[in-house]
Image (cartoon, helix red, strand yellow):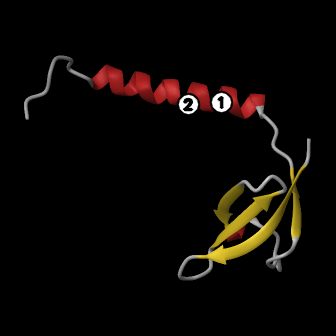
Amino acid sequence: MPLQLSVDRFEGPDSSIAVLASEDGASLDVPRAWLPAGVAPGDVLTVTFRRDDEATRKLAADTKKVQDELKATDPGGDISL
């Protein structure tokens, strides 16, 4: 379901963070680089979030691979500090 967010303002020393506001008053900070070129305070953006099942499975597999590689090199036991 599409969500409408208004660009409230830009923050940071180089104005690289966009503060977006929803109709219910919630705010969301996102990198300005994620927004379309030319977006200005007062503009309304339509955003849609969707779950990407394929990317989720790939991330889980990649994470498991790294964990397995780390586990294979772990001598076990406690560490001494």
For the point 49% across and 26% down, the residue is 65
Q: Which mark is residue 43?
A: none
In depth, the one of 53 and 18 nearer the eye is 18
**For this view, does 63 lie left or right of residue 55?**
left
- Residue 41 picture location, percent across and down: 79, 77
Residue lying farthest to the top in this orientation: 77
Residue occupied by mark 2? 62
Camera-nearest residue between 31 and 61 = 31
For the point 89% across and 67% down, the residue is 44
Residue 58's tag is 1
Q: Residue at coordinates 74% horizontally, 63% vertically from top-left?
A: 20
**Mark 1–mark 2 distance (CA, rounded to whole Å):** 6 Å
5, 33: nearer the viewer: 5
Question: Residue furthest toward the left?
Answer: 80
Q: Which amino acid does the dot numbered 1 rest on?
A: Lys
Mark 2: which amino acid? Asp
Left or right: residue 81 versus residue 66 is: left
Are the residues at dot 1 and dot 2 in contact (C-beta closer than 8 Å)? yes
